[in-house]
């Protein structure tokens, strides 16, 4: 319903618009729909404004302003402030108009509503033009053009730019923009923009001393104008142009028409009601400002009290912090002293522990040496025992050899004795078995664990006889003793030694005993 009412207003069907919006406002009031009530009331005011009933328009804007302040947001407040400012502008009170336009412009910036901010910048441009502050007007319109580029206010911004450029005497640029705009300004909703553009083109033609063209544009502006209030401006320009054309009679006639329009407009505006409504609005604004001042004072007083409490709290915190700092420093000194003593004791403890560990290590080393020595002694004892056994075996073999030789001589020389021959055979068998007895290696390995395996690993070419020979050398037996055990001559024993050294790929001058004992 609100959209339908606004569309009817834009089409100048004010009666239908007011009927729809009044009904809408009643429904909104019954349901306490403040947003809808505000929109309906504000647009009712806009209807009266377009009908030039400024008194009734201001009454409705004032009601809308109360709703916005009491129940809605700053966006609603800035909307109605803009409308009120337009009323002041129409009433030629530019200072008041500028004040409320500026307030609306600032609120739009606060809520980041660029479209509304652009509209209010356009309105501030119009006020600045009326005040002949064209430099300021140009600043506002440049900002408005950026903010309204893709909004419904883009055409209004460009139309206002044309007026500003005319005031700045930039006629060529103004004409160029006007030529671009006019084809787009068709329809009743754009009639006001079209009238303004044609009016400015008339002014440009006048400044270029082209009176026929100026009259032409002004007559077109009069045809497109639907705003009764703007007729005054048109008739003023007709009077001025006829005066320049030396047609005094027509100039005076249009001047009289201007006076008649002013009287008519003043009656339509319902002057007394308009003045009363303005007073009511100013009173409402004063009350709002007073309330804001009181709220500000209360806030400042609250901040002041909070500030004092905060200062006291900060002083207490600082005092407490200083006290804690002093106590902590004392405690820190005590802790540092205690830590120094503890560190000293720890150092002494570590030193003692180190000494104990060193003594324990020394004891272990001594025990290890003793154990090693004991082990060596046991090996040597076993080797001595093994050597003794080997020597005893050698002695037995030698005795058996002597006995066999003796008996053999007797058998060969003296007589044939079958029993003696059998004994000799048995002795020789015993002699061979004694020499080839392998139990020696078993006992040797038990005493010298791993020695035989090391020799086999390092020198795989060695045979069992070589290993037996080297075992006797490892037991530190002489060549004579080894030759007896092996039943070979001493010279044969030395040759075997040389052959074994060669097999082992060692130097001929090597000390064989030292070499094998170092493995």
Image (tube, rainbow, N blue to C red):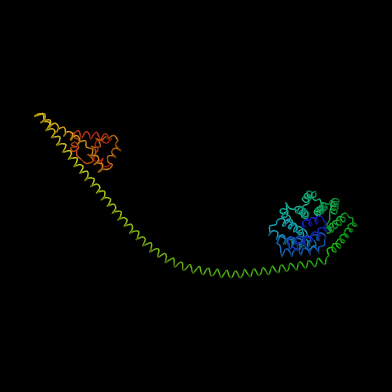
Q: Please state, as top left, top right, bottom left or bottom right, where the C terminus lies in the image.
A: top left
Q: Is residue 501 above or below residue 223?
A: above
- 430 on left or right of 85: left
Dividing the picture into quarters, in which one does residue 260 lie?
A: bottom right
303 and 73: which is toward the camera:
73
How many numbered callouts? 0
Dividing the picture into quarters, in which one does residue 129 lie?
A: bottom right
Q: Residue furthest right?
A: 249
Residue drawn at point x = 15 percent, y = 34 percent: 401
98 and 189: which is toward the camera:
189
325 and 348: which is toward the camera:
348
Q: Which residue lies furthest to the left in this view?
A: 414
Would residue 135 be seen by someone viewing this image from the given angle? no
Expressed as whole percent of the image width and height from the top left, the position of residue 499 reads 24, 33
Expressed as whole percent of the image width and height from the top left, the position of residue 197 reads 80, 53
Expressed as whole percent of the image width and height from the top left, the position of residue 228 reads 84, 58
Q: Please state, as top left, top right, bottom left or bottom right, where the N terminus lies in the image.
A: bottom right
Residue drawn at point x = 30 percent, y = 55 percent: 360
Expressed as whole percent of the image width and height from the top left, the position of residue 198 reads 82, 52
Residue drawn at point x = 21 percent, y = 35 percent: 436
Would residue 112 be seen by someone viewing this image from the given angle? yes
- 164 on left or right of 415: right
Q: Is residue 125 above or below residue 404?
A: below
- 408 on left or right of 166: left
């Amino acid at each position: 319903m609100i959209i339908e009412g606004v569309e009817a207003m834009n089409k100048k069907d004010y009666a239908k618009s007011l009927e729809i919006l009044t009904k809408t406002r009643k429904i909104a009031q019954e349901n306490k729909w403040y947003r809808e009530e505000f929109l309906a009331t504000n647009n009712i005011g806009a209807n009266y404004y377009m009908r030039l009933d400024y008194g009734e328009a201001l009454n409705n804007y004032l009601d809308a302003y109360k709703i916005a302040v009491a129940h809605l947001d700053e966006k609603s407040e800035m909307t109605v402030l803009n409308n009120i400012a337009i009323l002041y502008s129409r009433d030629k009170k530019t200072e008041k108009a500028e004040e409320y336009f500026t307030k609306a412009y600032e609120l739009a910036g606060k809520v980041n509503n660029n479209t509304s901010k652009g509209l209010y910048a356009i309105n501030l441009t119009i006020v600045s033009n009326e005040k002949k502050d064209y430099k300021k007007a140009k600043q506002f319109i440049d900002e408005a053009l950026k903010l309204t580029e893709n909004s419904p206010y883009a055409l209004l911004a460009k139309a206002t730019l044309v007026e500003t450029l005319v005031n700045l005497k930039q006629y060529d640029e103004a004409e160029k923009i006007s030529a671009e705009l006019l084809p787009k300004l068709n329809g009743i909703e754009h009639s006001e923009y079209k009238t303004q553009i044609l009016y400015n083109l008339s002014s440009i033609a006048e400044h270029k001393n082209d009176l026929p063209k100026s009259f032409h544009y002004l007559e077109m502006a009069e045809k497109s104008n639907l705003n009764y209030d703007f007729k005054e401006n048109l008739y003023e320009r007709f009077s001025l142009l006829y005066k320049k054309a030396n047609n005094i009679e027509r100039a005076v006639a249009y001047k009289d028409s201007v006076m008649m329009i002013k009287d008519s407009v003043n009656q339509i505006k319902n002057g007394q009601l308009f003045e009363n409504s303005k007073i009511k609005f100013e009173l409402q604004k004063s009350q709002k400002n007073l309330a804001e001042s009181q709220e500000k004072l209360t806030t400042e007083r609250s901040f002041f009290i909070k500030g004092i409490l905060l200062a006291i709290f900060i002083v207490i915190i600082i005092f407490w912090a200083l006290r804690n700092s002093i106590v902590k420093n004392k405690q820190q000194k005590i802790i540092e002293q205690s830590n120094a003593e503890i560190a000293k004791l720890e150092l002494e403890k570590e030193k003692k522990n180190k000494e104990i560990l060193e003594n324990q290590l020394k004891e272990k080393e001594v025990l290890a040496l003793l154990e090693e020595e004991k082990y060596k002694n046991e090996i040597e004892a076993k080797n001595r025992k093994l050597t003794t056994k080997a020597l005893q075996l050698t002695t037995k073999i030698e005795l058996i050899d002597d006995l066999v030789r003796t008996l053999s001589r007797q058998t060969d020389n003296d007589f044939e004795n079958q029993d003696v021959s059998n004994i000799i055979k048995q002795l020789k068998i015993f002699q061979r078995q004694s020499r080839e007895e392998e139990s020696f290696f078993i006992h040797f390995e038990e005493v010298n664990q791993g020695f035989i395996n090391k020799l086999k690993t390092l020198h795989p070419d060695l045979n069992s006889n070589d290993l037996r020979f080297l075992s006797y050398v490892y037991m530190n037996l002489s060549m004579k003793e080894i030759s007896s055990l092996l039943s070979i001559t001493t010279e044969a024993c030395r040759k075997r030694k040389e052959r074994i050294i060669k097999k082992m790929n060692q130097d001929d001058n090597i000390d064989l005993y030292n070499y094998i004992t170092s493995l």
